[in-house]
Amino acid sequence: MKPIHILSDSVRFHMDPIRLLEHVSLQIGYPKIPSDRNFYGKIQEIIKEGHQKVRIEFAYKETPILSWNDQSVVAGGIVIDSMRWAELVRQMDSPGRICVFIVTVGLAVDQWIQEVQGRSMFDAYIADAFASVWIEFAADRLSMEIEKQYARAGLECSRRLSPGYCDWRLGIGQNAIFKLVQTKDMGVSCLPSGLMVPLKTISAVMFTGKRVFCKTPCVFCNDRACRHRRETPPVKAP
């Protein structure tokens, strides 16, 4: 198949204001939108500020899956040292490629959160929650576009998986991804610890194949308390 080609416009999106307010409220510990008018107004005010700072940038790299065993997955230019991710690939029908991506909401958002912190720690808490929600939605939108383009070629995708999830150690995984994906034009960098700058940045891997029976490695894991758990029952092979 031809390489996928993702345009910037396909990752831009408008989020419904009420839905965004609900997600930010949930992020700061409120299961529902706060009924207090002053508090409600404060969240809306900070969301409005944040909208002006967000600048979504992304980069991605496709590479063929070359081999896999019980311990790792080897692809062109990257080795994923994870037993659980290797099992995910092993369960696939005709593993083909991986798509590695990095997406960020931009350094201006980090700077804005620091500015807000100077006037109020609580306001900064809300600002940080807004940015966390926005980067997750941006990563989801990019993942959906990647999945859609592979679907046109008759391929299925796993969900996006990031270093630090399961048993792919954060520092090792980030180092592998940043060697593969060029981020200079995005202004994104990675520290030896695996922490990315800007902070509101997500790196991830998606596996593709003719059939992807398990979307995440969670079905192979017994850690029920994992906060990243996204258990998906496996699709039975025909």
Image (spheres, rainbow, N blue to C red):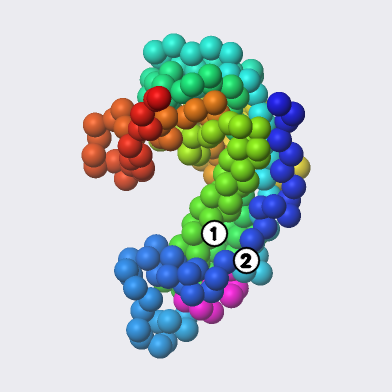
Residue situated in front as seen by the camera: 95 or 202? 95
Name the residue located 62 percent from the left edge and 55 percent from the top edge.
105
In this rendering, the answer to whether 21 lies above or below 235 is below
Q: Is residue 8 left or right of residue 81?
A: right
Is residue 196 highlighted in magenta?
no
Dot 2 crowding, Cα within 10 Å, few <14, some 14–19, many 20+: few
Disc tally is: 2
The secondary structure type at the circle numbered 1 is helix
In this rendering, the answer to whether 165 lies above or below 129 is above
Residue situated in front as seen by the camera: 205 or 199? 205
Question: What number is the disc on residue 116?
Answer: none
Specify whether residue 62 is in view. Answer: yes
Q: Is residue 178 left or right of residue 43?
A: right
Q: Is residue 72 left or right of residue 230?
A: right
Q: Residue furthest front?
A: 238
* In contact (CB < 8 Å): disc 1 and disc 2: no
Magenta segment: 43-50
Q: Amino acid at mark 1?
A: Trp
Q: Position of residue 63 (x, y in %)?
A: 65, 24
Q: Position of residue 99 (x, y in %)?
A: 61, 32
Name the residue located 59 percent from the left edge and 22 percent from the top edge.
96
Residue 148 image-quadrant placement:
top right
Residue carrying label 1 = 134
